Image (spheres, rainbow, N blue to C red):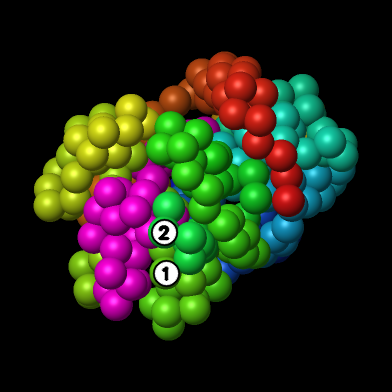
Amino acid sequence: MQPPERAGAGAPAWPAPGQPIRVVVPFAPGGTTDLVARLIAAGMQERLGGTPVLVENRPGAGATLGSQFVASSPADGTTLVMSNVASHAIGPALYANVRYDPVRDFTHIALVVSNPSVWVANPRSGLHSLADVVRRARSGRGLDIATSGAGSSNHLLVVRFTQLAGVELNHVPYRGAGPAMTDVIAGVVPLMSDSLPSASAHIRQGSVRAIAMSSAERHPGFPEVPTFREQGFDLVSGSWFGLSGPAGLPATAVERLARAVGATLAAPEVRARLIETGGTPGDMTPEAYAEFVRDEHARWAALVRASGATAE
C-alpha cells in the first residue's frame, strides 16, 4: 500500500481536516462515468490520508448541468467534476445555453480513462449486425435507439451513422446509461449506443448482444464484436473521462489531486478493472490534460457543426 500524499513543506493544509471532497458525476447512477468515478474516488480517498471523497450525481442536459454547478463552485478543491467528452467537448457546441467555457472555466487535473462506444441490442430484437439495423430502419416500422442523453458521444455516433447509412433512427435520450440499459434489457427499446465500460458486464452476461464497436480495430477484450468499419461504415469514435475543478484551484490542491489520481490508476487492481471493462487508463499531467480538453473541444465542435446535430 502506498503512503498517503502529503503537502510539501510550507504549503497550506489541504483539504482542511474533516472536509470532504465531492466528485460530481453529471450523469445518472449506473453509467460509465458513475462507475469510473466511484472506482477512482475510493482510491483517491485512501491516497489522501482518508479524506472522504464522495460521489454525487447531478444529471441533465448532456452532462452540462452538473458541469455548470462545478464551474460555479468555490475554487477550493473540494468540489470536482468527472469531466468528459459530452460535458467538455460536445455539449458546449450542441447546447445554445451552456454558460461555461470548457477550457477557461475549469482547472483540468487528470485524464482517468478513455474507451470506445458499442452498440448493443436486446437478444430478442432480431438485430445481429448493422445490416439488420439498416434493414429494420428502412422497413417502414421505424427503429428506436437509446443513449445516455442528447449531447453524448454515443448520441453523435448515432447521428453520423444515420448520415452515412442514409436511414433514420428514432433517438431515445435517457438521463444516464443505467436507465437506458435497463429498458434495452427489458425490451422497451431494442437498441442502444453505449460506452463499452458500462455495457461490458451486460454483454458478458448475455443480457444484451453487442453488434458493433467504434474502435479502429476489434477490442482485445471482446474480439467477437466486429467494428463499424468492418461492417462498411467508416466510423471511429470514443469517449473519455477525467477529473476537473473550477478555474483557479490552488496549486497545492491540483498537485495532490493529480498525484492521488495517478497513484490510483497505477494500482494493478484498478488498471485491471478498467482494462477488463474496455477502458484504457489515462496518463497525463494537468497541463497535458488541459491541452487535451482544448483539442477535443475543437475537434468535436467541428463534428457537431458538420453533422447538423442539435440538442433535443
Choose top left, top right, bottom left or bottom right for residue 85: top right
In this orientation, does residue 154 appear? yes
- Residue where numbered disc 2 is placed: 139
Q: Residue at x 19, y 50 (%)?
A: 225
Q: For the residue marked with disc 1, what is the amino acid?
A: Pro
Q: Mark 1 Cα within 10 Å, few/some/many (few <14, many 20+)?
A: many
Going by the image, does 103 lie left or right of 284? right
Q: For the residue marked with disc 2, what is the amino acid?
A: Ser
Q: Residue at x 23, y 60 (%)?
A: 128
Label 1 vs 2, first from the N-terminus: 2
Q: Which residues are magenta?
A: 110-137
Q: Is residue 72 above or below residue 308?
A: below
User: Is 111 contained in the magenta span?
Assistant: yes
User: Is 58 contained in the magenta span?
Assistant: no
Q: Quadrant of the N terminus?
A: bottom left
Choose top left, top right, bottom left or bottom right for residue 91: top right
Foreground pick, 101 / 138: 138
Q: Residue at x 28, y 49 (%)?
A: 131
- Residue where numbered disc 1 is placed: 190
